[in-house]
Amino acid sequence: MRVGLIIAGILVAALGIAAYLGKLNFNHDKEVLKIGDVSAKVEEQKTVPQWIGGIAVLVGAGLVVAGAMRR
């Protein structure tokens, strides 16, 4: 179980660093107009907020420490 916690911690921390640096983006489709069979959609590109990346880094570091200290 130690190795699993350490690997999970490293992955979460790596994703947190990417989010903190603004490298994690996702697309959001939004329907803005629909008249009968005709519809208009807008695709918005959003980034994950930096504070979520910072929290993920801390959680990942905590998992690594917990995996290293576990017997």
Image (cartoon, rainbow, N blue to C red):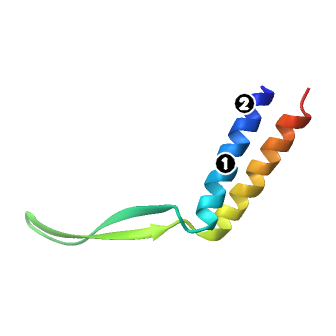
Residue 30, given in percent of the width and then of the height, sits at: 31, 67
Question: Considering only vertical position in the picture, is 69 above or below 71?
Answer: below
The disc at residue 45 is none
**Quarter-of-image position of residue 33:** bottom left
Question: Considering only vertical position in the picture, is 11 above or below 32?
Answer: above
**Residue displayed at 79% across by 50% down:** 61
The residue that label 1 is drawn on is 12
**Residue displayed at 45% across by 69% down:** 46
Q: Which secondary structure, mark 1?
A: helix
Q: CA distance from mark 1 to mark 2?
A: 12 Å
| Front in this rendered view, residue 53 or 39 | 53
Residue 54, given in percent of the width and then of the height, sits at: 71, 64
**Quarter-of-image position of residue 17:** bottom right
Question: Considering only vertical position in the picture, is 36 above or below 15?
Answer: below
The disc at residue 4 is 2
**Residue displayed at 59% across by 62% down:** 19
Report the number of discs: 2
Query: Disc 2 marks which amino acid?
Result: Gly
Whichever of labels 1 and 2 marks the residue nearer the N terminus, that label is 2
Query: Disc 1 marks which amino acid?
Result: Val
**Quarter-of-image position of residue 21:** bottom right
Q: Dot 1: within a 10 Å radius of its alpha carbon, few (fewer than 14), some, or many (20 or more) residues?
A: many
Q: Which secondary structure, mark 2?
A: helix
**Residue displayed at 67% across by 68% down:** 51
Q: Dot 2: within a 10 Å radius of its alpha carbon, few (fewer than 14), some, or many (20 or more) residues?
A: few
Residue 3, given in percent of the width and then of the height, sits at: 76, 29
| Front in this rendered view, residue 6 or 59 | 6
